Image (cartoon, rainbow, N blue to C red):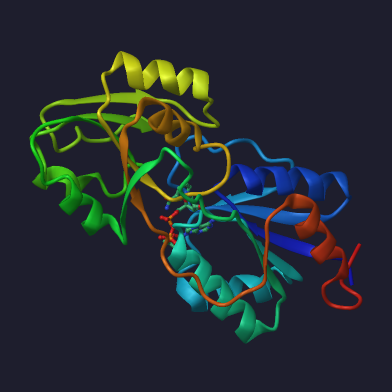
Amino acid sequence: MRANLLILAGTSEATAFARAAADAGLAGTVSFAGRVARPLRQPLPQRSGGFGGVSGLRSYLRAHRVTHVVDATHPFAAQMSRNAVAACAAESVPLVALTRPEWSEAPGDRWIRVSDMAGAVAALDRPPLSVMLAIGRMHLGAFARQVQHRYLLRLVDPPEAPPPFPRCEVIVDRGPFDTTGDLDLLRSRGIELVVSKNAGGSGAYAKIAVARALGLPVVMIDRPVQPDRREVYDVAAALDWVVHAGTDLGV
Ligand code: NAP
């Protein structure tokens, strides 16, 4: 049987894996949640939108005769990852997660670790500061409780509604970002504190390195717990897994 991959996407790793899979002559589909207006063009066919929970994903796997699932979603996309593990187990489709080790504190870092978004909101209960709120757009509403700060947001798409804080600047940009650019950005905006998810990987790390260099505190949001699953940390390992997972399901 020829391999037919389902790549759960939304990260630079997913795009890199899709490129490698296409170059290796593998067939498959790249799946996006549909949150971003202009997802990057992929070297394999792409689809967009939720599957409809575990049962919807099970139906999709059957209908499209998916042979392998590569979950290359963001480490904070925990619902999708849980659904993928459950659906693949139920349909006996092998699954691997292509993910990234989390960032850990380096000498000079001033991290305030919090376990979730609510913890990050609580950590901002302090006098006014200039804050880089690097959490995407989904959870901005929670920070309406801390309107005393001046916020800098960096989003992939312009926000559909104005952010819920009176003092705010939005920059529309898509990573990866580098330390030269982020040093310039944080300095020019007088940023005094950074709020970040512990995304891992290199594409979003520049602001963390810059905060360290400038001696700024970082409210670092821990990752959600992921289900038990096989994980790999680079594209080559994911490709190797596809070729060897399931005795006769390789290229
Ligand atoms: P989530 O909370 O885990 O997922 C919520 C629902 O969105 C899922 O149950 C699923 O709907 C749908 N969904 C998520 N990823 C999908 C995909 N790749 N293909 C099809 N449906 C998908 O996910 P999220 O945190 O909102 O993230 C959404 C997307 O943005 C993901 O592709 C993720 O990789 C990307 N992203 C997320 C973050 C972040 O910080 N969360 C950062 C960068 C990129 P159904 O239940 O209907 O199937």
User: Horizontally, is 65 left or right of 32 in the view?
Assistant: right
| Residue at point 84%, 61% (across, down) | 240
Confirm whether residue 156 shows in the render: no
91 lies above or below 33:
below
State which quarter of the image contains the N terminus.
Answer: bottom right
Question: Residue 225 appears at what percent x and percent y?
Answer: 44, 70
Q: Nearer the viewer, residue 7 or 108?
A: 108
User: Horizontally, is 228 left or right of 1 in the view?
Assistant: left
User: Horizontally, is 4 left or right of 100 in the view?
Assistant: right
State which quarter of the image contains the C terminus.
Answer: bottom right
155 lies above or below 96:
above
Outermost residue toward the front in this view: 107
Q: How many marks?
A: 0
| Residue at point 9%, 47% (across, down) | 145
90 lies above or below 166:
below
User: Horizontally, is 229 left or right of 199 in the view?
Assistant: right
Confirm whether residue 24 shows in the render: yes
Question: Residue 218 appears at what percent x and percent y?
Answer: 33, 41
Q: In which quarter of the image is residue 96?
A: bottom right
Q: Which of 130 and 47 is in front in this view?
A: 130
Q: Which of 24 and 221 is in front in this view?
A: 221
| Residue at point 49%, 37% (across, down) | 204
80 lies above or below 169:
below
Question: Residue 99 appears at what percent x and percent y?
Answer: 61, 56
Question: Residue 155 appears at what percent x and percent y?
Answer: 38, 33
Q: Nearer the viewer, residue 205 or 97?
A: 205
